[in-house]
Amino acid sequence: TPDVLIVNGKSQYNCLTTSLGWNKKIVRILPSMRFVKGKNNMKKSIYLPLAFKSKDKIIFLIKTLLDETKLNIANFKIKNHPGAANSNSHKDLIAKIKRIKQKNKFSKTNSKSSIFIGSSGAIIEALERGNHVFQICESPILESYSDKLWKGLKKQMITKNIFSYSLKKKNNIIILGKKDYSINKYLRA
């Protein structure tokens, strides 16, 4: 076992110590070095995953999300996964999502919404930055967050493949760090 296990929030601490049985004496909560305070506008964006199985299923689920929530995504940005910049499948999916955006007829706007397709650690970052998050899952058991493990998370099932998330309390899952944190300063905290 490690001498020290560093986590970035109370929810992570509770998940490891309560649900997974880690010794409380070796688990420490410190602010994140990856997710730092400052402007990182994640609002009004659709985030694509590194990999997916079916473009058709994703398109169907996006349309279902819009039908269920009446969300207007006409002004949402589509953000491809950096590791899939040259993927023809991703380019095709982006083109199909753009067509949905152009035809978007709903008027409900939520300027603090984000849509994530597939699994992503950025879902938690978006929540800690004050966004409301929708997640579209091809495989919900593998991709969705559990509010039973992550006690600081509120999860609502829209359909069996679509979820809505919000936080019970900020800085509970991830404490956003500071830009000037060096690794030495971090480990001495």
Image (cartoon, rainbow, N blue to C red):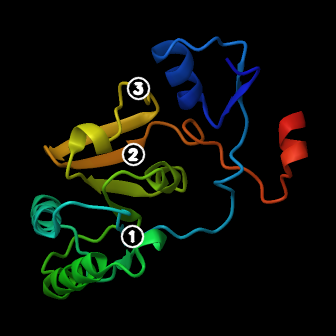
Q: Nearer the viewer, residue 44 or 33?
A: 33
**Quadrant placement of the N terminus:** top right
The amino acid beneath tag 1 is: Ser
Q: Which residue is mark 3?
A: 149
* Residue 47 seen in the current view: yes
Image quadrant where residue 71 sits: bottom left
Q: State the SS at label 1.
A: loop
Q: Secondary structure at mark 3?
A: loop
Give the amino acid type for the residue marked by disc 2 in the picture.
Ser
Residue type pointed to by label 3: Leu
Would residue 189 appear left or right of 31 to someone viewing this image?
Answer: right
Residue 166 disc label: 2
Q: Secondary structure at mark 2?
A: strand
Q: Nearer the viewer, residue 65 or 105?
A: 65
Within 10 Å of the Cα at label 3, are there few (<14), some (14-19), or many (20+) other Cα atoms?
some
To which residue does mark 1 refer?
111
Distance between mark 1 and mark 2 Cα atoms: 15 Å
Locate the C terminus and report the quarter of the image it occupies: top right
Residue 5 vertical placement versus 48 (above, below): above
Query: In the rendered image of this protein, does residue 187 appear above or below residue 59?
Result: above
Image x and y of residue 164, in percent: 28, 49
Closer to the eye: label 2 or 3: 3
